[in-house]
Amino acid sequence: MSKRTSTKEKLLMVLKKKNCLTIGSIMEHFTISEIAVRKQIHELVQQGLVKQKTNKHKLGRPYLTYDLTEKGHETFPNQYKRFPVELLQDLEELQGKQAVHELLNKHTDRDKIYLTKAIQSDDFDEKIAEMTSIQNKKGYMLEVEKSKSGDYRINNYNCPVANIASCYHQMCTNEKKLYEEVFPKSEVEAHSFIAKGEPICRWTITKPEGR
């Protein structure tokens, strides 16, 4: 006996197949009431799985369309987490560990160039704030704590590359080098890593002397 598909699951499937659907287009796939469907859509929006967009006509009232969010797309089977690791493992098997080492360094160099261009301020406190904002937009979950001495403790509650870093810890050591490049007058110390089983990644970036 096959498992019965819930209304929410069917909604996600409908929005996976087609983009920018109105409630009218969505209702073509349902026999239950529009009120019931709207209630399920509202819950999916609240859960961050579906996004709604207000569209304006030159004439007439605005109307809403619905799409899956990135989180909504991730509810479907994918290899996003496993595939990058398998590629690195294949590269290591074909060309050796040095090839993986150089590839990961290349990735870090790209991040360094991006960060140094994106951070506009020379002020230490402002640089910390800008770096935190940039990294959080990339999927990290950084929070900063400033000590009385002016040093910063960086707490990261989400590592978007933890699947790779757990297999290739060079990702973590490269991150330390990245912070050292961005804050060349500071000392950077790593205290814990998500990739090593700790609940968070924790770093200290010291205040530059004379600042």
Image: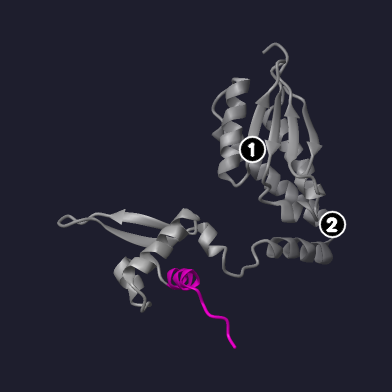
Question: Which residue shows up at 68% across the image and 40% down it?
Answer: 156
Please check the rendered image and state whether residue 104 is part of the magenta-colored stretch, yes or no.
Answer: no
Viewer-side residue, 26 vs 207: 26
Mark 2 neighbour density, 10 Å: few (under 14) some (14–19) many (20 or more): some
Q: Amino acid at mark 1?
A: Leu
Q: Which residues are magenta?
A: 1-17
Apparent side of residue 7 relative to residue 106 in the rendered image (left or right) = left
Residue 185: % across, % down: 72, 22
Please name the residue that numbered disc 2 is placed on.
97
Mark earlier in primary sequence (1, 2): 2
Say whether residue 132 is visible. Answer: yes
Residue 50, position as x, y percentages in the image: 45, 59
Question: Vertically, is 135 above or below 63?
Answer: above
Which tag is nearer the camera, tag 1 or tag 2?
1
Residue labelled with disc 1: 142
Query: Could you say which is closer to the camera, residue 17 or residue 87?
Result: 17
Which amino acid type corresponds to the residue marked 2 in the rendered image? Lys
